[in-house]
Amino acid sequence: MSVFATILSDCCLSVMLLLSMMIAAWWGELAGIRPGRDKSGLGGFAAIYLFLPLRWLGLAILMPSWAWLGVHTALGALSAFGFARGVERVQNDREVPVLLGLLGALLAVPALWVDFTNVHSLPTTGRTSLLAGTALLALHSVLYLRRRRDLRRVRPPTATAADDGAMPFK
């Protein structure tokens, strides 16, 4: 592969990695919504259906074979349907299982790993390949788990006018 093609491919991979990280954080946000809480922000999750196809297309361009493209397509459809299922669970006031959210956040990792090894002509076995796959798994897992934890954190009750000595309005 020429130097220009490698640089262009790395730029594409970098953008797809950023998109994938955003999607992993969205999965964490979805899995962090507790039953009985405010659901007024669910409309913002519609943006994921713009970013999922964009990530799929960007990663599909760099796929080394039709077989990998088929696997990538199946995982992309699974991710979209899984997210829709998660939103449905939240709308029905049920919790999104941690495993569903984590799997959804990690579904892009195989495609990113295959594209990385393909662009840099690395064998799929070996230390560098293993290190790249482990780093991708860790990055996506941390983003998912941190965003989920942020939403699960117990917040103190809000202060009222009576708490600070002010007279409440009648």
Image: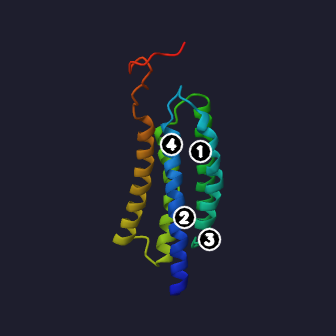
Secondary structure of the residue carrying numbered label 2 = helix
Residue position marked by numbered label 3 in the rendering: 61
Circle number at residue 58: none
Residue 66 drawn at (x, y percent):
63, 69
Which residue shows up at 58% across the image and 50% down it? 79
Amino acid type shown at disc 2 = Met
Residue position marked by numbered label 4 in the rendering: 29
Amino acid type shown at disc 4 = Glu
Instruction: Please tell me which of labels 1 and 3 falls first in the chain.
Output: 3
Secondary structure of the residue carrying numbered label 4 = helix
Q: CA distance from mark 4 to mark 2?
A: 20 Å
Amino acid type shown at disc 3 = Ile
Instruction: Please tell me which of labels 3 and 4 falls first in the chain.
Output: 4
Task: Check the image and report above or below for 115 versus 18.
Answer: below
Task: Check the image and report above or below for 113 versus 42.
Answer: below
Instruction: Please tell me which of labels 3 and 2 falls first in the chain.
Output: 2
Residue position marked by numbered label 2 in the rendering: 16
Which residue shows up at 45% across the image and 38% down it? 151
Instruction: Please tell me which of labels 1 and 2 falls first in the chain.
Output: 2
How busy is the neighbourhood of tag 3: few (under 14 within 10 Å), some, or many (20 plus)? Answer: few
Circle number at residue 83: 1
Instruction: Please tell me which of labels 4 and 2 falls first in the chain.
Output: 2
Which is in the foreground here, disc 3 or disc 4? Answer: 4
User: In the image as oriented, which residue stretches furthest toward the bottom?
Assistant: 2
